[in-house]
Amino acid sequence: MALLNKVDFYNTFFQKDKISTVFSRLFYKHNNALFYSLEKTEKKNDEATVNFISLFPQYLYPEIKQAQNVRVKKIQQKKLDGFAILINGFKDVDTYLANTLKSSTRGPIKKKIKRLELCFNIHYKMFYGDISEAEYNVIMPQLKSMIERRFTERNNTNEALGKWDSYLRTTLSQIKKKEASLFVLYSADEIIGVSLNYHINKVFIGHIIAYNIDYSKFGLGNTIVYKLLEWSINNNYSIFDMGNGALDYKRIWSNLTYNYNYYIVYNTSSFLAFIFGNLQVFKVQLKNTLKVLNVIYIYRKIKAHIFNKNKKDTSLQTSVKYEKINIEAFKKLRLTKIEYQNIEDNLVKKAIIDFTFAHQNHINDIEVYKLDSTSFIISGKKSIQKIIID
């Protein structure tokens, strides 16, 4: 038995068998209802070890079995906020929006959803409890590709990609056991948005949200959150948890900002457990102090600067120019019509998608022509535009 048992609670608590057995019961903080109870058949085999539990969300609170010589240290994890939606009392997503978001915020969200559905053949599907292996093997690579493309554009890394093999190996069975789900946003047969979610009791966790950045004008991130919240309300969840990281969409949607706690549990009658337990307390307190003083942030910034100092600029060097064309000039051009589905150049595809947004044209009403190797014509119901790849 290892002396030190470290558990990242947040990233494992959606799997009951991975909840540390130092917790006898867990409760929802907002209404004191029972969230989880240790089964009598589960052996508390980690009582003699030093148990270090991090990322325990404060919308839950634990009951820890008090035993002689056992000490429990609870310490808040500094400089890390979590964001969630407390659903209780809201009958539908629009009621939540009306009561939580300003009209200047909720108006554009709903407007962009309507425009997306006006311009494309949009449909949504939640894979929860039932998914074929063939469907799974199509969706997961698309999700990965969208994450990679988004973070390449931002010249940044993403933690999920480092764990991708684990996600790929476990998610299919979790969906079938209703421990996880995949929400997919389709434009006709094309996947343009995916969310990987986890479920435990009345908590819905929007774990990874990704979308095709060519559709950025349509605000797909907000559309996905809207649909996930709608599904959560319709299925009687209490909390829609969006996790940590102060991203704009989380700030916009959340009505509950929470922190995380460390729990360090150790047996004072064991000399080694006492030493190791207090060492973990000291390390956490030191780390919190460094965070409050921004030392860790400054260190990471310097490290990133040094690491990237010899890197060439990886931003896109190609740009798109737009020219409006009148109908007379359009008729004189010698053009080759091409199908939207056959266009592979992302810049051209994005220009077409942006055109549908700006002119509120359905994609089926738009015709695309190739003028030469770098020039294309987009023709809608009332407007014609030339795009030049520079």
Image (cartoon, rainbow, N blue to C red):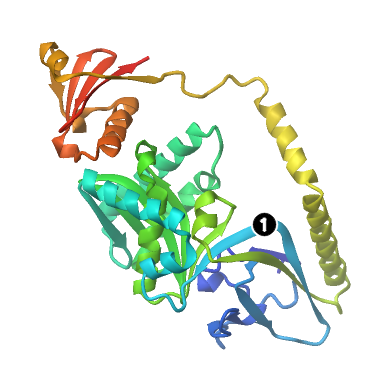
The answer to whether residue 204 is visible is yes
Residue 164 position (above or below residue 177): above
Residue 24 position (above or below residue 240): below
Image spot of residue 51 (x, y percent): 72, 70
Along the viewing direction, whichever of 43 and 364 lies nearer the viewer: 364
* Residue at 31% over, 16% down: 388
Quarter in which the N terminus is drawn: bottom right
- Which residue is disc 1 drawn over? 80
Along the viewing direction, whichever of 101 and 185 lies nearer the viewer: 101
* Residue at 62% over, 66% down: 258
Image spot of residue 96 (x, y percent): 43, 68
* Residue at 59% over, 52% down: 246
Residue 57 position (above or below residue 299): below
Q: Quadrant of residue 372?
A: top left
Helix, strand or loop for disc 1: strand
The answer to whether residue 52 is visible is no
264 left or right of 55 in image: right
Along the viewing direction, whichever of 219 and 267 lies nearer the viewer: 219
Quarter in which the C terminus is drawn: top left
* Residue at 28% over, 47% down: 116
Give the crowd class for mark 1: few <14, some 14-19, many >=20 residues within 10 Å.
Answer: some
322 left or right of 27 in image: left
| Residue type beneath disc 1 | Leu
Image spot of residue 352 (x, y percent): 27, 31
